[in-house]
Amino acid sequence: MARLVHAVAGRPVAASASPLLFLLTVARLEEAGVQGIALEHSRALRIEATTMEGVFEQMTEPPLAKGGLHDAVQTRLVQSPRPRSAATSSFHAKEGRWLSLTSPLKHLIGDWDCVDDAHALLSVNALRLQGDQVRSAGTDGAGVLAVARLAGCGPNGGAILRMRGGGGAARSVAHAWVNAGGRVHLIEGRRPLTPALPESALAGSAEQAALGIDFDGEGGALNASKHLIPAYQNKAVHAEGSLDETLIDGRWMLVAQHLEAWRILWAPELQAMLPSIPDLMEDLVAVEALLDGR
């Protein structure tokens, strides 16, 4: 049985839902019948750090003890079981040491083997450690695209994303949107978006946007049919987690980019067995309520 260790690293990370998402995903994979992977042998960490050296040091000797999140995840599976998959799949690695990165670490690129364009965008948010090798990816953009399509406001047909922000997540999302055929209207924020988008992909301020995202959190209307609210930590769930309302809770983005990291970096061989974005979102909201005593 493989020993899996996942950490979310950055500052601050105390309220991050990434450790819970990791354990929920492991538990659902085990429940579905995936061999070689088990909640019992998986650990989730939070690493407060501003340098990658500090992160790697804390990943070398992770704690063996399980935390309270394990009990909450087990309770969720008992309360809401899902059927075993008819397909068979196995996790063959002897171990997994995986990282989810947040601010201020996304732009601190090392000599890593990148599986996508995250290094060029200085927007790495997922690492896989394997011996002396480090593999990297950036999944924020793919996560937002997946959620937008589920919500019926994707980039198809040149649909417009109206966005404020120039940080790592904003860079990933803007370039992913354009690469998928959409256009972007950029609102000036705290920092410019670099690398710049091609002129042909830019939209005007008078045009109605399919989706609006304010990564700087300044508030104000963005003249969009739907708005994704990136901030979720210590906040109530917007619209009870529905994708049918005008406001889309930021947990959707986190869930989607977490599953994308499993799919393209951590365990590509298990992608057909992964829970769906809506199912994992439902699990996350339910366990958060359980932990809050609601």
Image (spheres, rainbow, N blue to C red):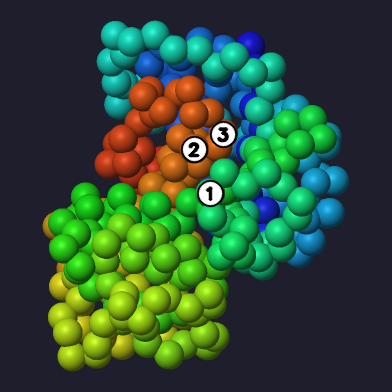
* Label 2 secondary element: helix
Q: CA distance from mark 3 to mark 1?
A: 14 Å
Which residue bears the numbered disc 2? 264
Q: Residue at x 46, y 56 (%)?
A: 140
**Front residue of 28 and 215:** 215
Q: Horizontal and vertical percent for residue 106? A: 63, 62
Q: Considering only vertical position in the picture, is 100 above or below 270? A: below
Q: Horizontal and vertical percent for residue 154? A: 22, 59
**Front residue of 168 and 72:** 168
Q: Residue at x 37, y 87 (%)?
A: 187
Q: For mark 3, does the 10 Å Cα neighbourhood hold few (<14), some (14 to 19), or many (20 or more) residues?
A: many
Q: Is residue 168 visible?
A: yes
Which residue bears the numbered disc 3? 266
* Label 3 secondary element: helix
* Label 1 secondary element: loop
- Closer to the observer: label 3 or label 2? 2
Check residue 209 in the rendering and tell me which mark sits there, or answer none.
Answer: none
First-in-chain label (1 vs 2): 1
Q: Is residue 77 visible?
A: no
Q: Residue at x 21, y 50 (%)?
A: 150
Are the residues flagged by discs 3 and 1 in contact, CB closer than 8 Å?
A: no
Left or right: residue 131 versus residue 24 is: right
Q: Residue at x 49, y 29 (%)?
A: 268
Say what amino acid the circle numbered 1 marks.
Answer: Asp
Left or right: residue 278 versus residue 230 is: left
Q: Horizontal and vertical percent for residue 243? A: 20, 55
Q: Horizontal and vertical percent for residue 162? A: 30, 78
Say what amino acid the circle numbered 3 marks.
Answer: Trp
Check residue 116 in the rendering and tell me which mark sits there, or answer none.
Answer: 1
Q: CA distance from mark 3 to mark 2?
A: 7 Å
